[in-house]
Image: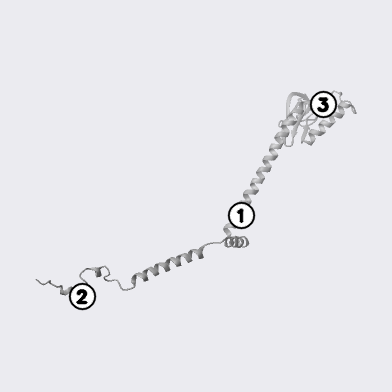
Amino acid sequence: MADKKHPDNDAAGVPDDGTAAAGAGVPSGAAPDAASAAEGDAAASADGIEEDELTVQDILDAAEREAAEPTSEHLADLKRVTAEYANYRRRTEANRAIEKERVTGDIVKVLIPVLDDIYRAEKHGDLVPDSAFATIAAKLRASVERLGLTSFGTVGDPFDPTMHEAIFQQPSAAVDTETVGDVAETGYYLGSTLLRAAKVVVQVPSDG
């Protein structure tokens, strides 16, 4: 029996083995064109990356331009940092002065009993002028004064409860207000800090 031929396939010119189906609808030369386009896109992307990369010189140039013409935001940051640094320096200097005064006070407090002995000796006439004891006493007083120590408490001073400690009250017709009549123990200031109040006898106005 003769084989039946497919008139439709013959008319279309398509081989019976179906190999043409794989390439159906694809124009000749389409695949190479697509590959070329992909390579072109990749090259363009690579060129764009190279153009966008910054060099060290670019960064330095930008920094110089920024330094020459700073923005308002950077100027505000600079002012803020400057103010913070100024406040920090003031706090540091204040704390340093306080700490220095505290340490000096601790040292001077050790010498106050010696100064008390010198004061009592002077009060009772035991501190003879031009003697060795008087010379040593003068040097010691000069040394503590250089450290900022000052003494107070003198007969005739107005009584001040913030710096005087009254150990006795003595009525007197010779005074109109409370007055220091005698000093039992000298008071001392170190700078503006009260190290010790002066112990005094206070004369108060008498009714008679």
**Can you identify the residue that label 1 sits on?**
78
In the image, residue 120 lies at what x, y percent?
Answer: 81, 24
Point 51% across, 64% down: residue? 52
Who is closer to the viewer here, 3 or 116? 3
Percent position (x, y) of residue 79? 62, 54
| Residue 101 figure quarter | top right
Q: CA distance from mark 3 to mark 1?
A: 58 Å
Would you name the residue on which mark 2 appears? 12
Q: Do the CB atoms of the residues marked 3 and 2 lie less than 8 Å apart?
A: no
- At x 67%, y 40%, the residue is 95
**What is the spatial separation of the Cα atoms under label 2 and label 1, in whole angstroms?**
83 Å
Q: Is residue 202 above or below residue 148?
A: above
Element assignment for label 1: helix
The disc at residue 190 is: none
Image quadrant where one finds the N terminus: bottom left
Q: Is residue 76 left or right of residue 111?
A: left
- 142 over 77 or under it: above or below: above
Q: Is residue 182 visible?
A: no
Characterize the local packing of mark 3: few (<14), some (14-19) or many (20 or more) Cα atoms within 10 angstroms.
many
Sequence-first disc among 3 and 1: 1
- The C terminus is located in which quarter? top right
Callout 2 amino acid: Ala
Which residue is drawn at the image coordinates 74% and 33% (left, top)? 189
Q: Is residue 197 above or below residue 94?
A: above
In this view of the protein, which residue sits in the foreground, 114 or 59?
59
> Please, what is the three-letter code of the amino acid marked with disc 1?
Leu
Q: Looking at the picture, does residue 96 appear above or below residue 31?
A: above
Label 2: how many Cα within 10 Å (few below 14, some 14–19, many 20+):
few
Give the residue pinned by disc 3: 118
Q: Nearer the viewer, mark 3 or mark 1?
A: 1
Within 10 Å of disc 1 (Cα), the crowding (few <14, some 14-19, many 20+) is few
Mark 3 is on which residue type? Answer: Ile
